[in-house]
Image (cartoon, rainbow, N blue to C red):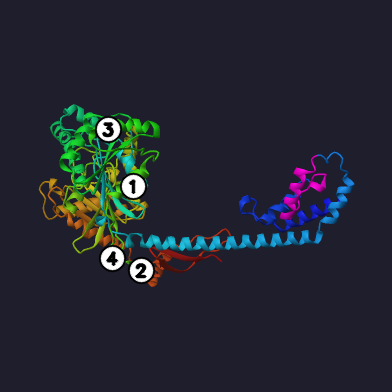
Amino acid sequence: MQALELLYTSTASKTLSILSPIPKLLSPSSLSPPFLRFLSLSRPKPRLLSHCVSPFPNTNKQAEEAFDKDDLEELGDEEPEESEGEDLSAIDVHALEEEARDAAREYSSSLSRELIIEDEASDRSEIGGKRRRRKTVTTKIPDHLLPRVTIVGRPNVGKSALFNRLVGGNKAIVVDEPGVTRDRLYGRSFWGEHEFMVVDTGGVLNISKSQADVLEDLAITTTIGMDGIPVALREAAVARMPSMIEKQAASAVEEASVIIFLVDGQAGLTAADEEIAHWLWKNYSNKCVILAVNKCESPRKGIMQASEFWSLGFSPLPISAISGTGTGELLDLVCSGLKKIEGPENLDEEEDYIPAISIVGRPNVGKSSILNALVGEDRTIVSPISGTTRDAIDTEFTGPGGQKFRLIDTAGIRRRAVVSSSGSLTEALSVNRAFRAIRRSDVVALVIEAMACITEQDCRIAERIEGEGKGCLIVVNKWDTIPNKNQQTALYYEQDVREKLRILDWAPIVYTTATTGQSVERVIVAASTVEKERSRRLGTSILNQVVREALAFKAPPRTRGGKRGRVYYCTQHMILVQVLLDVR
């Protein structure tokens, strides 16, 4: 008995010593059956060896049957010595050791094969990922050819949350207050074999409401920057705001193939929902309209919440934009109303990359007016109220020479202390979106106001642009407000800008008047020049000459041992510059 236990223990220890390099975090399902059987040998063995589990499958079944039927009554009378002798004669020790070695070799070889295959797959995914990153923009269908899916509804029903859910990101600002979204926001989405553009819109308000109720629904009374505006101009701008938001929503519905009419299931049916439904039935009955009842997190309660919306004339679908409940069924209905769009045959796979130009600056300097003047339409809402733009608005634009650009309109950036003291979460998120736009752009157009010239906040924004390593041009907007201009005015103004913005002394300066469209096209010309200079490659001889002049001006520092670093050569890799140094 002791000899057999020693044999089992030695065999298991050999097996475990062979498999010691194998990671311990392997799941039992990945282990082969022989390996599992031999791992069981290291466990404590029962004293009655006649009823032990044999390492062979057929013997296991026979032992279990014999144990279940006949041996229950004989356990108390059976002697250990007789059972030991019977099992010692039945076990082949050499076969047991040979099977252990074979199992160890088989498992180690299979594990090595899996590791090799996993490494090769990761390498292919990295290489494929690089290729996909290079061809993501070039091989996909252009945005203007994709069908539109527009989300409409009254304020604060969750349109931006649903937009973020469908496009798979955090592109739109989501805050639990009405009137956050004002402009049209576009994002690509796909479901199955269908790819489409999702359009987020501002809340549509009914005209029958009073002016005070409209301002309360849009939260315009808390809009930032109202103090510096004259009372008459403020009242006129506030009165036009609802109609301008509705105009943006109507433009998005006009170009849509499918309309998602979103309502609030927790708030129930309201008069605004009925008026929007009547507006859709009257003007867009020829289009596919899907009634989605949002904020129905519970499936059971969602059916009850959606039942009262049958009176609108559409079939309600309970969903939850936050948790994603019902969005799969919603996308199935959306795709059923879309036609599959094939890419154009003449689309080149190696199409040139589209550079991005972000328009940034302080509030109320004319950023949205510049974008509208370039595009030639009211793409964004323009208002004298500061803080009108909230999200970063992306718009594709084709320049005079046929080159494509992606224009990004951003919210006004105020000082961090002012934003913190105002306590507005919406403005903080808007500034964050503006900084993100700078980070993902190639060229930044810093817009300043002509009468204000360069302020401290303009210098801070310029430092942010230079720190991100982006190309930049300075746009002096509202040039028509400068009185008594002559030929020397622009020269003196440029000297003042260069003196105050020394960190951007290389940036070109463009003078525009966005309201009339004067000299706005020069922004694209200057941005194209900056983008070409930014992507220009310099020869090794030029870089080495610059490095030699720098070393002649100031030698490299010495190490603790007294040795001075030596520069061998300098070369440009992609857009970065590499310098090879050696310290000996």
Q: Is residue 298 visible?
A: no
| Residue found 86% across the figure and 49% down from its top | 84
Sooner in the amino-acid sequence: mark 2 or mark 3: 3
Tell me the distance, in whole angstroms, between the alpha carbons under discs 2 and 4: 32 Å
Depth check, mark 1 against mark 4: the one in front is: 1
Say which residue label 3 marks. 309
Say which residue label 2 marks. 538
Residue stretch in magenta: 45-72
Specify few, some or many for label 3: CA neighbours under 10 Å numbering under 14, 14-19, or 20 or more: many
Q: Amino acid at mark 2?
A: Leu
| Residue 247: percent from left, percent from top | 17, 42
Q: Give me the disc on residue 347.
A: 4
Q: Residue furthest front?
A: 69
Tell me the distance, in whole angstroms, between the alpha carbons under discs 1 and 4: 29 Å
Say which residue label 1 marks. 332
In terms of secondary structure, where does tag 2 sit?
A: loop
Sooner in the amino-acid sequence: mark 3 or mark 1: 3
Sooner in the amino-acid sequence: mark 4 or mark 3: 3
Q: Amino acid at mark 4?
A: Leu
In terms of secondary structure, where does tag 1 sit?
A: helix
